[in-house]
Amino acid sequence: MATKDDIADLRSELNSGLANVAADLHELDAKIDATRKDLSDQIVGLRRAVVEYHSAVIGHGNIIAELEARVRRMEQHLGLEGH
């Protein structure tokens, strides 16, 4: 049969184990928060890069369209429309 000292030792071990689990959970929460922040920062950076890329592509598209329109006007002016 277990004595009072045995029960006290078991309680102490249990409390120590629970404290270790609580500390591990706290550490895990901190790591999850840090990972979430890193991922958030990466997503923001990716969104910014995509917006910049699309802006550049649209900008180039506008420049090319303007150039083609200008070339068509020059061809018409010079009478080179059918070539």
Image: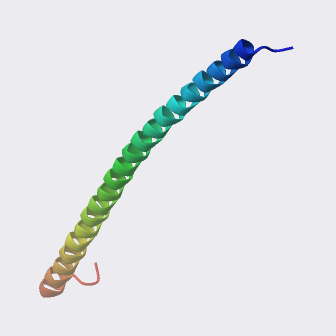
Please tell me which residue lies in front, 10 or 25.
10
Q: Where is residue 9 in the image (x, y as percent from the top left)?
A: 67, 15
Residue 60, above or below 33? below
Residue 54, above or below 8? below
Q: Where is residue 23 in the image (x, y as percent from the top left)?
A: 50, 30
Please tell me which residue lies in front, 3 or 80.
3
Along the horizontal axis of the image, is 18 left or right of 79? right
The residue shown at (14%, 81%) is 74
Quadrant into which the C terminus falls = bottom left
> In the current view of this chain or complex, which residue is farthest to the right?
1
Residue 30, above or below 6? below
Residue 79, above or below 55? below
The quadrant in which residue 52 appears is: bottom left
Q: Where is residue 54 in the image (x, y as percent from the top left)?
A: 31, 64
The residue shown at (37%, 46%) is 37
Along the horizontal axis of the image, is 3 left or right of 54? right
